[in-house]
Amino acid sequence: MEQRLLADAQFLLLGSQTHPRLLSSPHSALQPLLPLITSPGASLPTLSSLLKTLTLQLQCTTTTHLPRIVLALLSALSDHHPDLRREISLAVRAFALRLLPFSPSSSFAHSLAILFKDADTSSDVTDEPTFLSICFRPCKASLRRWLLQNVDKFCVRPSVLIAVLLGFTKDPYPLTRKAALDGLVWLSDKFVAVEDQSLLQCCYFSAAELLFDAEDSVRCSAVRTVSEWGLLLVESNQDKCKIDWSDALFVQLCSMVRDMSMKVRTEAFDALAKVPMVSQNVLLLTLTKKATSATKEITFPGRYAAKICKLPASAAAFAFIHGLEDEFFEVRRSACCALRTFAIAYGDFACEAVNLLMDMLNDDSVVVRLLALETMHHMAMYDCLKVQEGHLHMLLGALADDSTLIRSAAMKILQLIRLHKLAMFKLCFEGLVRNLELYPQDEADLLSVLLNIGQNHGWFVAHLIQENTEKIEPSVGGRLGFESARIVALLVLAISAPVSIERGICSIPPRMYSYAVTLLGRISDALIGTLNQNDLLSHLSRCSRFSCVSSSEFFRGEESAVPLVKSDTSLYPKNDGIHGSCSQRLLELERAVHPIANYPLKMHDEMESSMGNILQKIHSLWPLIRCGFADEATRTLRSWKKQLKTFTCISSEPTAELVFVLQYLRMIKLLGRVWIRCMFPLKPCFGVRKLEVLFRKLERSLKEMKYRFLGFSSEQELHILELILVTLILKLSNVKACCPSTNLKEISSVVTHVEHLVGGRSVELSSFVIELQKILREIGPSTAVLENALLLQKSLEYYTLRQFMFSGMLVHVAAKLDVYNNYENPLHYVLGLPVGIPIEITLRNISRESRMWLKMTFKETLAQFVYLDLHGPSGGDERRQFTFVAPFYGPPKARSFLLKISIGMECSSEPPYRSNVCGGPKHELINISGDSEVFLARVGG
């Protein structure tokens, strides 16, 4: 096949320059050569002959379109076969030099693109004189734009390049102007410290002129250019001039937030977030509709319109209000991020911004409300969120929202804010109780909020419990009213009040701690990640034996160093407590009053110590497994697993290292059972069918370790690849459990991966891998399957399980599905129509480039796949949460049915499926979430 394609190409290109097919349709005539070039199995002699043919054609061609096609084939040949790149570059260089005296053409651009891949052969066609001669010759606009987009590939002095780029900002073609501006943005990174103010101002004002260009794309690039060169101007000035230029840049960017293009407005707010400083009077203008008379008179250097060169300060008026009320989500998001940046740095601005953000909580869009809450949460983290009573009503209103995301974001804010009035504290408590009644499913989160609020407001807790003691007491029959959400909230709030361990006193009646024991399970759910159930019980039991003192006596004894403001409305100390500038005494008191605060750190140290000990010992079990004593090894592994399982209750999200070690223990247990069956076939064990199940579990476990954990070092990755090789060899030795030819290809592929991993690094191959390489070289195509298995099995004699050591921080790839649906409350569907299933999805440590699929399974055999596009949902790679409505097509003709849903990550490095499901993944999926059940019922029964 290779020879026939090569012969056809030689006949077309060399045998007959006037071949009808070549003249009429050169693209289709030479198209069959592309599979030959891209094929990884193409032989080197064939490719060398093809290269020689293409080179000869390039030297003697006279057809107009043929050089471009030949160059495209040479480019593909260079990309897929780096060994030929040097020879290709020399041939293309000769062709480019031959074209250089003439007017630049697209063929010359194609030639340069190939030469850019090999810097050694491109020096005489990418130097400064060549670049300048091409720029100032008559040529097509597309070629001029291509040159400007690739200015970084040419060896041109920055001073010369600035002059060229500034000249092309006046080009009549908009795409050329855009490319020139993008080149200036790239060039701004080269100027770390520039003293030539005239040069910086020239670039800045040239870009500012294009802020009013007719083309949207040019204005977008102009905003970026103004931002980058404006920042250079600010950095290059000193003291008063620095703040003046920063104000000028800020106002200039504010003038673009009302642009007609959504992309320009988004770019303007993104650039505003980078401005290092701004005068407070100018910043406050962005939240008001009108500027004062004094501010109106202030002007800055810049562009207010195409022909107005003075920029009034009033151009910044209403800027953030425009952005936060914009019709496009992208603009509102950028405006929120920019507002967040300035709110943290400027206190007065933060106070004004809170009013605007609170108004956004009335927006019809869930996305807008969530953005506002996330911005306020960020401000609260830096203690910049000053909440008034009117604001608190709005926040508590968000707790009643239908969206789980909105409620969760509001609760995060309530945990951080400081309430300075008893009336506000009571209002907050009532709002949380109301939410607990409306959304019982939020109980764990709400109780956690109550515990945090109580710890931060001890005075108010004591006062509130004293007022409601009678409501908490048992009834006449001795029953506690724990069916009431209010009683549960009061008890949780009560145990959060500070106690003095040293003095053995508390500010609430000690019997409240005894009553709280009856809620032990519910409270421990709220304390996941802070305290486990046993330690919580111990804490409640100890506090129930304390003596109760009045709140004034308790806090006077503990906080005598802090002046108090005693009035009808405020019982809280003047000092802002843990969020303010506390004295060392208060910090010591914080640790004494809440001794459980440092508990997670202690447990985390114990967990790391346990994992380290297990990883040091686990390789010592391998001799037992090799000798056939798998039961003894399994008992040890189970005890270690049980030891580590105790740490999973510390946090709702165990560390990646803990999850990995648990997975590693399970994998070793499976490997031991498989080893016994394959290496000791006469030993009573289990049947072939059970062995196939074990192999599937073992392979799935290894693939999850390989793909669901990020941050492995070369040694750690090599450790896992060796375990995969052992599994594949064991599988090959049991012919009934595998396809021998496929398995042998997989072994070769993994060995190649190992060689690539080790190449160029200070990592040594184990004797097992070295022996395996020798055996693979000996195996020929005619070798029998059984003989192959026996040869490969010999390499296992060299395998030894090495110690696995953590050398960095692992990252665990995971997903969570929440479907608020059960048997008593099913989703309804109409027979014959697709049904939409609303799902709340949380993704952790998954990049936007990953291919994620939602798998919906009916009766374990029928599966439908839905692709998840991660470029839409907001959030970073570390955590991304969004709601997705999954369509399920063709529901069965049944009154009701159960559907299982999970999320899988497509592994592009794995071989493709032989029979791919139509519209589904092309490669194997690794399940990264548990199965969630969805109950569906037909309308009408």
Image: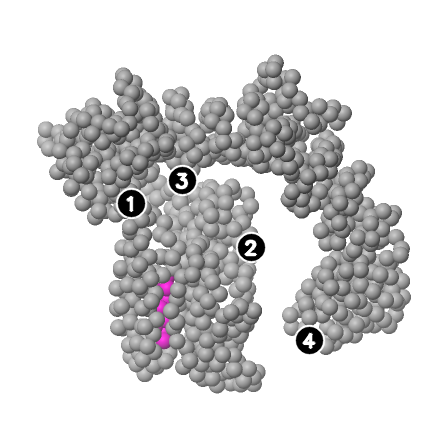
Count all numbered tags in the image, as a single digit.
4
Give SS at disc 1: helix
Tell us which disc is closer to us: 2 or 1: 1
- Residue 34 is tagged as none
Vertical arrangement, residue 130 with respect to residue 297, above or below: below
Q: Which mark is residue 919?
A: 2
Determine whether label 1 and label 3 are within 8 Å by CB. no
Q: Of the residues shown, which amino acid type is indicated by label 3? A: Gly
From which residue to which does the magenta span run? 663-675
- Secondary structure type for disc 3: loop
Tell me if residue 685 can be seen. Answer: no
Identify the image quadrant of residue 29: bottom right
Q: Is residue 449 magenta?
A: no
Residue lying farthest to the top in this orientation: 293
- The residue at which mark 1 appears reads as 598
> Predominant secondary structure in magenta?
helix
Q: Position of residue 815 (x, y in %)?
A: 43, 50
Label 1 to label 3, Cα distance in Å? 57 Å
Percent x, y of residue 337 = 53, 35
